Image (spheres, grey):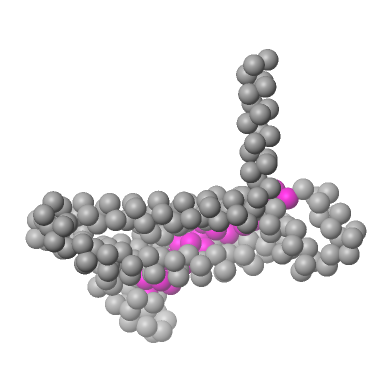
Amino acid sequence: MNWVGNNLELIGELALVHLRQSLIALIAGFIVSIPLGWFAWRYRLVRSSVITITGLLYTIPSLALLILVPVVTGWYSIVSENNLIVALAVYAVAILVRAVADGLDSVDAGVRQASTAIGYGSFRRFWAVEFPLAGPVVLAGLRVTSASTIALATVGILVGIQNLGYLFTNGLQRRIIPEVFAGVIAVVVLALVIDLLLVFAGRLLMPWTRGTRTVSRISNRTLVKA
């Protein structure tokens, strides 16, 4: 473990780079997924097609995507950080579109009708009523996506993009096992931290869900006692 103690600065720098890459991709994927998820929910005839097509994006091998996209588009080089961010955003969209569509589907129709009755237009109703109420389902998808994105980002090192994946390849090449373990632990810690922040944000932005969980727990205890 001496290697870890002697290289804490390197691990910290790589972790910050890794975190930046993952967060940018996660935010970009989330932004793109909202209109796509709404479209899949709103137009039932194409819902299955939209969700299936976006879901299939996740089946593309990550290394192949990192090589093909810059070659086909010519927008950036293979070793560009943008290449990794775009690839991670694509995988995020593959998960989040279904989460957004399912979240909107979970909103009670009566609530929509009530908001329309008091004068909410479709745009205002979406942002003020439907999307907030879809929040718990969307948050669940976002938590899965964040863990997936942070883990997948390590693949970037295979095409020369620096992040925590460097500790894997360098440690294996030099047979420094503590370096590999340091990379694994750093990725897991990042994923846990982001997950906890998302949970905290969910409780802060959706305080009504806490009341629902409390009622559910009380009901369960009552049933057990009965």
Q: Quadrant of the C terminus?
A: top right
The residues colored magenta run 83-107
Residue sticking out furthest to the top: 226
Query: Is 22 positioned to the left or the right of 33 in the image?
Result: left
Residue 42 drawn above or below residue 32? above
Measured as percent of width and height from the top left, residue 112 is found at 81, 55
Q: Disc count in the image?
A: 0
- Residue visible at 11% across and 54% down in the picture: 2
Find residue 162 and report its image quarter. Answer: bottom left
Q: Which of 32/131 is in front?
A: 131
- The answer to if 187 sits in the magenta stretch is no
Measured as percent of width and height from the top left, residue 143 is found at 49, 53
- The answer to if 90 sits in the magenta stretch is yes
Measured as percent of width and height from the top left, residue 202 is found at 58, 53
Residue 141 in view, yes or no: no
Measured as percent of width and height from the top left, residue 215 is found at 68, 34
- Residue visible at 76% across and 69% down in the picture: 123
Query: Is 52 positioned to the left or the right of 22 in the image?
Result: right
Find residue 71 and report its image quarter. Answer: bottom left
- Residue visible at 68% across and 40% down in the picture: 212
Residue 4 in view, yes or no: yes
Residue 27 drawn above or below residue 102? below
Principal SS element in the magenta part?
Answer: helix
- Residue visible at 77% across and 48% down in the picture: 108
Q: Which of 202/111 is in front?
A: 202
Query: Is 25 positioned to the left or the right of 126 in the image?
Result: left
Residue sticking out furthest to the left: 174
